Amino acid sequence: MHDSPLNVAVVGTGYVGLGTAVLLAYFGHQVVGLDVDQEKVETLRRGELPIYEPGLAELMQACGERLRWTTDYREAIPNADVIFICVGTPPLPDGRPDLRFVAQAAQAIARHLNGKFQVVVNKSTVPVGTGDWVARIIEEYAPDYKAGRYGVVSNPEFLREGSALFDSLYPDRLVLGGEDERAVARLLELYAPLIEQHFEAPAHVPRPAGYTRPEVVSTSLSSAEMIKYAANAFLALKISFANEIAGLCERVDADIEEVMRGIGSDQRIGRRFLAAGVGWGGSCFGKDTAALISTGEEYGYAMPILKAAVEVNQRQRQLVIAKLQGHLHRLKGKRVAVLGMAFKPNTDDLRDAPAHDCIARLNSLGATVIAHDPVAMDRARHEWTHLRYSEAASAEDALRGADAAIIMTEWADYQALDWERALRSMRHPLIIDTRNIVKRSPGLGTIEQIGRRLPPPPVPMVGVTA
Ligand SMILES: NC(=O)c1ccc[n+]([C@@H]2O[C@H](COP(=O)([O-])OP(=O)(O)OC[C@H]3O[C@@H](n4cnc5c(N)ncnc54)[C@H](O)[C@@H]3O)[C@@H](O)[C@H]2O)c1
């Protein structure tokens, strides 16, 4: 529990804002989460979560009265010592991020600042210069504006959906960017329990063995803004690199998993984010790589490496259908099971999910689609109304009678499936495993993976006695 709790307002209660609000309340601060989405706020007031994020509901309950929800800026802002901006920054058609919500939030915050020293923190992913722009908005709209009265800090977020709690409680680093020392000092005070790891680890998210504390990276405002984009761009690059090598592995009969294990054990490279598959998806990588490329264009600076990473990712998505056509030729009238809709496991987030493009392409080719996802089907019912597919109650149901199945998301449930039985239940036993989750061939049908051939089933030990 924090020795001197602060009053915090979190503006925007999506994946990032919700996690931030719960985390800070868990540390003992008084937190008000604010959103313009009335329905979301009502859901939160009932103690329910509007998103699927493992473990978050339990932590939210543990916060009790320290956590409140509102749609009213008057209720959240005047009393806050620290105000987080966590609104969305979705991509515009030309790749630049849409900063409309940041502008609206900053103006509304500015109008309700109360004249004491208050710190506005940008947690949304925003292009370099946005912090200065937010400071100008405050200057223009704050009723009692005086130089030095309000501080702006950039504190980018690095959590991964699906493991948001773990990432927030035990981060690798905390980036704090800003020139106003008083403002940065306040954030260090706010985050003291995290930096010192002076909090009781929740039973369901234990502190990992060997973890001590996050590195605090103090930077200028613009470096902090750049760090977030550069980090996501580099991770996207790693995935595209693995996918590019995977394509060559298929041609020369090498195994991408072995190759990546071999290069990843070099500490200069590292093992993580080298999984070949259907390419990246989700709300961040596509948007953030596009934003960085467009910043380059704005400054007359070409970014060929990043552009190539995006191109490889697009090619990878098309590969799924090409592999399917390689076996079935015509997809018209074929029944195709799509296993997994969320862009990755342990989330219901469907933003830029590869499964979306896959279903859309199957629709246009005249295939009948049966889709399944352990948690994202409800959300898809509202967000993917333009797609044609029917829902299956289980993965087994989706597979029964199908001409082919595509594994789009590496849910643990799918990894644990009895694939031999599943293949037997299909009309035509063909699986395109875009996440390489099936580890051994069940000995019947075809399981096609990315960048590797599936190892054959174990040979029975004939004539060997114990
Ligand atoms: N989702 C992630 O995994 C992740 C990780 C790191 C960084 N980010 C970045 O964090 C930001 C937020 O992402 P998200 O996934 O939480 O978005 P989200 O779309 O889930 O949530 C944004 C919320 O802001 C609310 N909002 C919009 N305008 C508002 C306003 N004027 N006042 C109050 N609330 C308003 C929306 O109603 C919505 O609930 C983005 O910039 C994103 O790039 C996201």
Image (cartoon, rainbow, N blue to C red):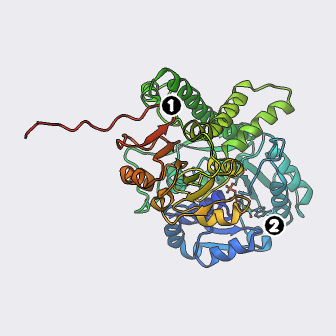
- Residue 39 image point, x, y percent: 71, 74
| 211 relative to 277 in the view: left or right | left
As helix, strand or loop, the secondary structure at mark 2 comes to: loop
- Which residue, given by chain and number where applicable, does mark 1 sit on? 451
Residues at marks 2 and 1, CA–CA distance in whole angstroms: 58 Å
Q: Quadrant of ligand 1?
A: bottom right
Which of 274 and 400 lies nearest the eye of the viewer? 400
431 left or right, relative to 308: left
Amino acid type, mark 1: Gly
Report if residue 283 is visible in the image.
no
Residue 298 lies, with reference to residue 343, above or below; the image says: above
- Taking the spot 67% from the left edge, 69% from the top edge, the residue there is 32
- Residue 447 falls in image quadrant: top left
**Which residue occupies 84% across, 55% down?**
100
Give the mark count.
2
Look at 74% across and 57% down and name the residue there.
87
The correct choice, above or below, for 260 with respect to 281 in the image is above
Extreme bottom residue here?
46
Q: Residue at x 68, y 37 (%)?
A: 314
